Amino acid sequence: MLKPKDHVLVIFGASGDLTKRKLLPALLRMEAQGFLPERFAVLGIGRTEYSDHSYREHMGQELEKFSFSGDLSDSKLLKQLYYVALDTSSVDDYSRLKRKLDEITEVDKIPQNFIFYLATPPSLYEIIPAALAAHNLNRETTANWRRIIFEKPFGYNLASARKLNKFIHSCFEEDQVYRIDHYLGKETVQNIMVTRFSNGIFEPLWNRNYIHHVEITSAESIGVEGRGGYYENSGALRDMVQNHLLQLAAIMAMEPPAVNNPTAIRNETLKVFQAMRPFTEDDIRGGIIRGQYMASTIRGDQLKGYREEEGVDPASRTETYVALRLFIDNWRWGGVPFYIRTGKRLPTRVTEAVIHFKPTPHRLFCFYESAMNHDNQLVIRIQPDEGILLKFGMKVPGAGFKVQEVNMDFHYSDLSSSFLPEAYERLLLDCMNGDATLYARGDAVDEAWKLIDPVLGYWDGHPDTGLHGYPSGTWGPQPADDLIEGENLSWRYPCKNLTQDGIYCEL
Ligand code: BG6
C-alpha cells in the first residue's frame, strides 16, 4: 500500500459526531497499520473554544467513551491534533486558519499539502470553499496539493446539486474534489468489481441472456436515532437510494473498464447512470412503494413509530422505506429489472445484492418439496457477515431425481487475515493518495439526481401519493412484494402479513 505524502488534514466540524465516531477512529486504525505519512497533523475547526491541549484531552475522552477499542497510549496521532475555533461563515476569520496552518507546517516541517474535510451541515458547502479560495488555500502549485472532501448529502435535489457543483468548480478543479459515498468505501462493494472482472466464470453470464432480475436490499433495524430533524427533510429515497444504492447498482451493472484507474472506472459507472430509464408518472404512482414505520412491540420492547420520534412532525408523510423497480436501457441489461429497496426498523441489518439467474429452459427433474426456487442466485453480502453465496440445485441422494437447493457459501471471516477495513479508512487513505476512484464524480451525482428528482417532484406535488404504514420490525409494506413479477418470485426476505399491535395500513 502506497504511503501518503506528508500533509495536514483540516477537519471542519471537528467537535461533531462524525469526527469522533468515524474520522478519528479511522485515522487511529490507519496509524496502527502504518498508513499515515511520516509528517502529518490534523487541524480541527469548530465553533467551540478549545486550545490544542484541551481539544486533545476532549477527543481522547470521547474516543475512549464510545468509538475506539484500541490502545490510545501508543498513539502519536493524539499529539498531532491541533485546533482553531472560528466562525466558518466569516471569511475574515480564515486568516486565523491560514496562520495556524503556517505555524503547524513550519514547526512540524510538513509541506503545505492540505486536505479540507467538510464534516459540517451542507449549508456550509459553498461558504467554506469560497472562504478557502479567498485566502488562496485552494491553489495548488507544482510542489503542493490541495484537496477538499464533501460529506453527503451532496445537494437536496437536481437544481441544488447542480448549483453546488457549479459553485465548487469556481473554487476548486474537479480533480481536487472528493465527494464521499461511504458505500463505495466498503470492502465488499469494491469486491464486486474483483468478483466480476478477475474471474472468467461470472462475466459471460452477467447479462440479459442469463439474468432474470437483480435485487438490492439495504435493511436497517434501527430507526432514525435522534436524527428526526434531518430525516424529515430527507426520507429514504434521498438518504439511501439517490447515493449509496444507485452507486451499488452502477457497480453491479457497469462494463469492464479498459484499465484500473479512477477515470476509466468512473467513466463506466457514469454510463450506467446515463442508461437508467427515467421514471414516468405511472411508474412513480404504481412502481415506487413508500412506507413509514409504525409503533410496535418486539420481544417485549416497545418501539416508537416514526411520527413519535423527536423532531418529527406527528403527521409526517416522510418515507422511511422505499422499494422501486429500475431498468437500465443498454445492450447488457435491456429488459432486466433491478429491484431496489431500503428501510429503517426492518427485522435486521443486512445489505446485499442478489443476481437471480433465469431458470433452465426445460424442467427435467422434480423439485423437492418446492425447496428449490426456480432460480439460481448469487448473493453478494455487503454487510454484515460479508461474503458471497451461490444457491443452486443438487440431487437429493437416493432413488429418483429429486432436486434440492444447496449453498456454496464464502464468508470473509473464513479468511485467516479477515480484517476488513472500515469504509472511512479506505476513503481517507485514497484521498491522501490522490485516488478518487471510490468517490462520486460530479457528473455521476448529477445523473443520479436526474433520475430521482422527478420522483421527489411528483411526491411534493401529490402529497396524497400512497404511503404505507408498516409495523416496526417487519419487512416493510406488503405492496412491495407485488413489485417483483414472475412465477414464484419474491424478495429474498418477503414481507409477512403481520397482524401484531401494528397493522399494515394506508397513512
Ligand atoms: C447514511 C444514512 O448515509 O447511511 C443513514 O444517512 C444510514 O440514515 C447509513 O443509517 C447506513 O450506512 P451503513 O454503512 O450502516 O449501511
Image (cartoon, rainbow, N blue to C red):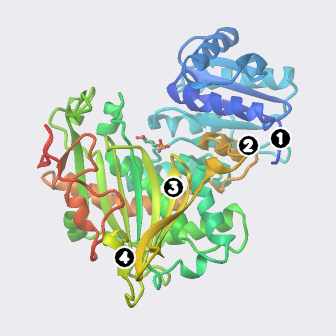
Q: Is residue 162 visible?
A: no
Q: CA distance from mark 3 to mark 4?
A: 21 Å
Vertical placement of residue 440 versus 405, above or below: above
Residue matched to label 4: 374
Give the left or right position of residue 140, taking residue 13 as reference. Answer: right
**Which sits in the foreground, 172 or 23?**
23
Q: Amino acid at mark 2?
A: Met
Q: Amino acid at mark 3?
A: Arg
Residue 63 image point, x, y percent: 60, 20
Q: Amino acid at mark 4?
A: His
Mark 2 and mark 3 residues within 8 Å of each other at the beta carbon? no
Residue matched to label 1: 5
Which residue is at 51% across, 32% downward? 120
Image-quarter location of ligand 1: top left
Q: Secondary structure at mark 4?
A: loop
Mark 1 and mark 2 residues within 8 Å of each other at the beta carbon? yes
Q: Quadrant of residue 213?
A: bottom left
Residue 382 image point, x, y percent: 52, 53
Residue matched to label 3: 381
Q: Is mark 4 within 8 Å of ligand 1?
A: no
Give the left or right position of residue 451, taking residue 320 as reference. Answer: right
Give the left or right position of residue 162, taking residue 117 as reference. Answer: left
Residue matched to label 2: 432
